[in-house]
Amino acid sequence: MDEKYESLKLENQLCFPLYAASREIVNRYKTALDNIGLTYTQYITMLVMWEHKCISVRDMGKLLYLDSGTLTPVLKKLEQKGLVLRKRDSSDERLLNVTLTDEGLALREKAVDVPQQVKCTLNLSQEEAIFLYGILQKLLEK
Amino acid sequence: MDEKYESLKLENQLCFPLYAASREIVNRYKTALDNIGLTYTQYITMLVMWEHKCISVRDMGKLLYLDSGTLTPVLKKLEQKGLVLRKRDSSDERLLNVTLTDEGLALREKAVDVPQQVKCTLNLSQEEAIFLYGILQKLLEK
DNA sequence: CAAAATTTAATTGTACGCAATTAAATTTGA
DNA sequence: TCAAATTTAATTGCGTACAATTAAATTTTG
């Protein structure tokens, strides 16, 4: 009788637990990130900086799937904190290069055990984690 | 040498693809939801309304893992659109009951093929979808 | 019973995300 | 070559998320 609307039940949505779990995990980072003075978005931005040392906003956006509308204010905040520098590329003034400062690099020492702190609070087996990672990558493919 | 920082590489984070995939999926709902005039948050709120007809903000919050800080403005917007009514519970004035209007119920007819429209754009097999669902539920457990 | 504790929704303030637009720099192509 | 198209970051505006606080209603407890 109500079969017609079966697909609209919350429990039949795949999107919803994905959305809820994402927020839940970001929340579990909160305590660990508070200790190093970063928000989650600032943290993943710093993960990119620690790997690349210098990168354009464009390339950062590709790695994080975020546009300048989101990144510009985040990067300005990180600059305020003294963790990065923002400077136009001399050979292409459209590009803005973001570079890691000594202070930004130093923060990595404090961030190094953040992943472990959070992993402890998750209930996934190694196998589940790997499978989940694979599926999520597939979802992210264009 | 750099092993110490291996855990801080973006590709070794489980949280990041979860966060990125969640945003990606919400985005894939955009076109279908634009057609019925809802945002994603308004949509999942309406999913609850279509199932329950009448529910308190408190219970809605438990189902969606959202607090009144998020829900109050969403529900006010849905009320503006004429899709729901907001009224204090007569036996406990602390509670605010949200009820579906005829217009809100009518919108379900237009929403009924939203899930199918979005599912088409995903690349997951039935098995993968079920496994993903199970893992996400596990993540959402307290 | 009455004071204290709890529950509930709303409000306030901060920080995203993202679409759309703008403006500047660069590249392309007739 | 130089006008048109493209690329890039910034800006603007809207809609969440969420912590912290507030205020009202209810429940608990001494």
Image: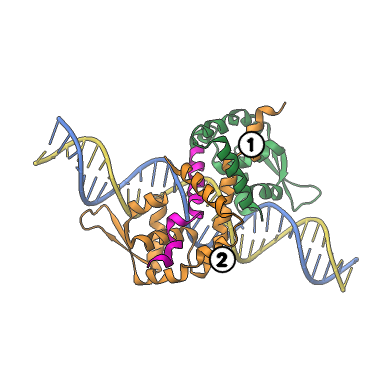
Chain colours: A orange, B green, C blue, D yellow
Relative height, residue D4 to residue B62 (above, below): above
Residue B62 position, x and y percent, is 68, 50
CA separation, marks 1 and 2? 38 Å
Location of mark 2 (residue) = A31
Relative height, residue A80 to residue B19 (above, below): below
Relative height, residue D30 to residue B123 (above, below): below
Numbered label attached to residue B83:
1
Q: What element carries label 1?
A: loop
Q: Which of A142 and B88 is in front in this view?
A: A142
Q: In which quarter of the image is the N terminus of chain A?
A: top right
Disc 2 crowd, CA 10 A, few/some/many (<14, 14-19, 20+): few
Give the chain of mark 2.
A
Q: Residue at horizontal 67%, vertical 39%?
A: B49
Q: Nearer the viewer, residue B83 or B47?
A: B47
Residue A141 position, x and y percent, is 43, 41
Q: Is residue A75 magenta?
A: no
- Residue A42 in the figure: left or right of residue D3: right
Q: Give the range drawn in magenta.
A: B1-29
Amino acid type assigned to the residue bearing label 1 in the image: Leu
Q: What element carries label 2?
A: helix
